[in-house]
Image (spheres, rainbow, N blue to C red):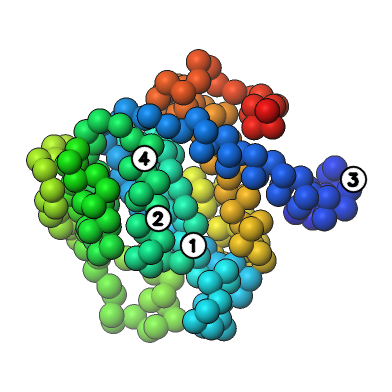
Amino acid sequence: MRATARLADCHPRTVLSVLSTVGEKCGQLHDRLARNLKVGSLQLDELWSRVGISQKRTTENDVERGDQYTYLAVTAREKFIASYFTGKRNYENTETFVADVAKRIIGRVQVTTDSYRPYQSTVRRHLLERLDFATMQKLYAVPFDLPDKIRRYTPQRCIGVRVRIQAGSPRPDRISTSFVERANLSVRHFNKRFARLGLGWSRKLDNHKNALNLFIAAYNFCKIHSTLGTTPAHGIGITSQAWSIERLIEESTK
């Protein structure tokens, strides 16, 4: 934020004010355009971030600080982020997220999630009549022979996956969470607020959500995906061409 303020020769609070306005508008733009989506395969996952203070310093009723999880629903073919939600990782927020996914998708869909238990009941509840559903759990080898301080930052080795069919008849070649995990990486890489070991975390949840709104709008409508050769929004048929950032802001403020 301070670097942007120096580049624009303005006060950091001005940057936050612009972020708040444009972020809210981009969220409304996504809500308006990401409707009636026809997708073959959808992948759901969530990624961690911190807001304000660490989780161990929060209280039970402090829901706007500490650990916050961003739920993402990504279409496998078009790489389009169809739905997203930020909040605590619990059953109520998972159901809110899945309900939002269900109202944006039309027709039959294949869904893949990790083994997080609330997905199993909420996905069935909101999509059962048009659902092929499987869960994929990755198994990792934990190096117990290393000291704890070293083991915390040592990459774990994936030794296999456990796939379970939850509903319908999902195609085996479409059971994967690779695309949504790659989208998680994009969110974390291009948004400093999601950096794990640094000082760039959000101080307020509203600013965190607005920054995410802006990033996902730019990702869907402006960023050319190397695999598609166009933007995810163009690939899924929402727009007729890739948008510039100026076009995105113009469309979001209409």
Q: Secondary structure at mark 3?
A: loop
From the image, tell me which residue sits under label 4.
Answer: 103
* Badge 2 or badge 1: first in the primary sequence: 1
Q: Determine which of the numbered discs, if any, sits on residue 96 in the image.
A: 2
Outermost top residue: 240
From the image, tell me which residue sits under label 1.
Answer: 87
Q: Secondary structure at mark 1?
A: strand
From the image, tell me which residue sits under label 3.
Answer: 9
Question: What is the spatial separation of the Cα atoms under label 3 and label 2, in whole angstroms?
Answer: 40 Å
Seen from the viewer's position, the closer of residues 69 and 224 is 69
Question: What is the spatial separation of the Cα atoms under label 1 and label 4, in whole angstroms?
Answer: 20 Å
Q: How many marks can you see?
A: 4
Q: Residue 54 falls in which quadrant of the image?
A: bottom right
* Badge 1 or badge 3: first in the primary sequence: 3
Q: Are marks 2 and 1 in contact (CB under 8 Å)?
A: yes
Question: What is the spatial separation of the Cα atoms under label 3 and label 4, in whole angstroms?
Answer: 43 Å
Q: Amino acid at mark 2?
A: Thr
Question: What is the spatial separation of the Cα atoms under label 4 and label 2, in whole angstroms?
Answer: 11 Å
